[in-house]
Amino acid sequence: MILGAQFYTVKDYTKDLESFADSLKRVADIGYTTVQISGTCDFEADWLAEQLKATGLKCVLTHTKADKILADPKKVCDDHKIFGCRNIGLGMIPGGKGLTEEKYLKFVEDYKPALETINANGCGFFFHNHCEEFKRNAEGKTFMERMIDDLPGINFTLDTYWVQYAGCDANVWLNKLKGKLECIHLKDMAISPEDWSHLMAPVGYGNMDFEKIIETAAGCDVKYLLVEQDKCYDENPFDCLKKSYGYLKALGLN
């Protein structure tokens, strides 16, 4: 498995092309060889291809705006192929927080044809979970389980932090989704000493058992371990990425 950096971590440093290019260099200097592009300013596919070549990085996944995927999924595929990435990700079910049955059914209706087009063009569609997708309906099925049935061909970017936040076991869900995983998100969970709230932490600096998670991921055909930290609080996000990289490298990963 190969380590990567999820660029949503450094979203505040990618608001224009100049800072975006600099951030790619900084991430490469840490030692990461792959990235997920998410939360950045708009860019042309040719521009990103040039920047990846210059830094030696490989883009293995994106989070692409929902309206772009729905408007022209074939063009999204064509653009991704220009910068050498065939994995097209969606960060969440559209409509904001508060996942309801109505939002879910609209998501399935809208994205089923887009997903089919993406797969037909040699790319993959990857859904990224938060905690809400683990809500259960009256029959006891989670939204995650329903997606497998309702959207044939879907893949998942399992976010280990949000699985834990939902009160579930990342190891169980890695096994449930085996065959539908290529990239997963690693970020750790710590507890605030002030109010006992959940805090995001660099991998290895919280309370999650990442040695076990990584062992399970290795047996579930996961190729890329993408480090993400949505919030870094008072720390510099590049420092947080470096801490995660150091911990994971010490486990024998690169």
Image (spheres, rainbow, N blue to C red):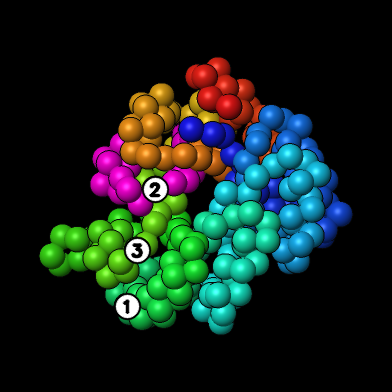
**Point 30% across, 75% down: residue:** 101
Q: Which residue is mark 1?
A: 105
Q: Is residue 231 left or right of residue 218?
A: right
Q: Secondary structure at mark 1?
A: helix
Distance of mark 3 from mark 2, alpha carbons? 11 Å
Front disc: 2 or 1: 2
Name the residue nearer the viewer: 210 or 224: 224
Image coordinates for residue 37, horizontal then vertical, percent: 64, 54
- Which quadrant of the figure has residue 114? bottom left
Front disc: 3 or 1: 3
CB contact under 8 Å: marks 2 and 1: no
Q: Secondary structure at mark 2?
A: strand
Q: Secondary structure at mark 3?
A: loop
- Which quadrant of the figure has residue 178? top left
Q: Which residue is mark 2?
A: 181
Give the residue type at disc 1. Answer: Leu
Q: Looking at the image, is mark 3 or mark 1 earlier in the sequence? A: 1
Give the residue type at disc 2. Answer: Leu
Q: Is residue 177 magenta?
A: yes
From what the image shows, is residue 242 above or below residue 186? above
CB contact under 8 Å: marks 3 and 2: no
Badge 2: how crowded within 10 Å, few (<14), some, or many (20+)?
many
Residue that extends furthest to the left in the rendered view of this protein: 139
Which numbered disc covers residue 21? none
Q: Looking at the image, is mark 2 or mark 1 earlier in the sequence? A: 1
From what the image shows, is residue 169 above or below residue 41? above
- The magenta stretch is 171-193
